Image (cartoon, grey):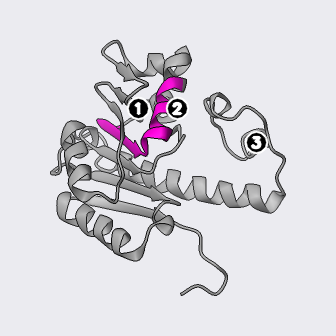
Amino acid sequence: SCVTKGYMKDDYVHHFVRRTTKRAPIINRGYYARWSVLRKLMLQFLNAGSGSDDQKRKQILSLGAGFDTTFFQLQDEGLAPYLYVELDFQEVTSKKAAIINHYNDMKEKLGPDASISIEKGEVTSTNYKLFSADIRDIPKLDAVIRMAEMDPSLPTFIIAECVLIYLDPTSTDAIVSWASEKFSSAIFFLYEQVEQFSH
């Protein structure tokens, strides 16, 4: 709805959404606000140290990535980071891997070395990795990060967008603590729903 109404540009969302659902303007504006804030901060992160080696060696980690297409948009704009890693439950990553495999406009963005396993819900290429993981399982999270060849010493932009609110507070605390201890130079982008009188 947001894309068809012109609130934002996404050339890949139609691969994931078959039917457009008409939404109230306030809902579209809410989605736009969420998208624009994330995009603004992400681009600031990617453009920091412009022209230096530091600018080129950056990575993004998306926890509970769902069917987000940000990596492919960044590729089109020539802004993709050194490494972009997405994690979600296997039922989600398997569907996403199947869709990426099916559409050439997405598959070709991965490069000739790409490997796709729909069964495992995995996509691996030089600059993009999609893996299944229950992010509440910290040892598994560590193992997947190693498998994705993320470098904890590199500047890292971590995204948790409408994810942690669905977890219990203990799991949420563990994930945030893990991220702060694991990566020496990181930004943690957290976007969650709150009720009107939430504290």
Q: Is residue 154 above or below residue 98?
A: below
| Image coordinates for residue 112, horizontal then vertical, percent | 34, 12
| Image coordinates for residue 191, horizontal then vertical, percent | 51, 64
Q: Visible in this render: residue 72?
A: no
- Locate residue 186 relative to residue 74 in the image: left or right: left
| Image coordinates for residue 96, horizontal then vertical, percent | 51, 32
Q: Is residue 148 above or below residue 100?
A: below
| Image coordinates for residue 19, horizontal then vertical, percent | 78, 35
User: Residue visible at 24% across and 50% down?
Assistant: 140
Q: Secondary structure at mark 2?
A: helix
Q: Magenta span has 187?
A: no
Q: Magenta span has 90?
A: yes
Q: Earlier in the sequence, mark 2 or mark 3?
A: 3
Q: Which quarter of the picture shows residue 129?
A: top left
- Locate residue 135 relative to residue 72 in the image: left or right: left
Given residues 51 and 145, the one toward you in this image is: 145
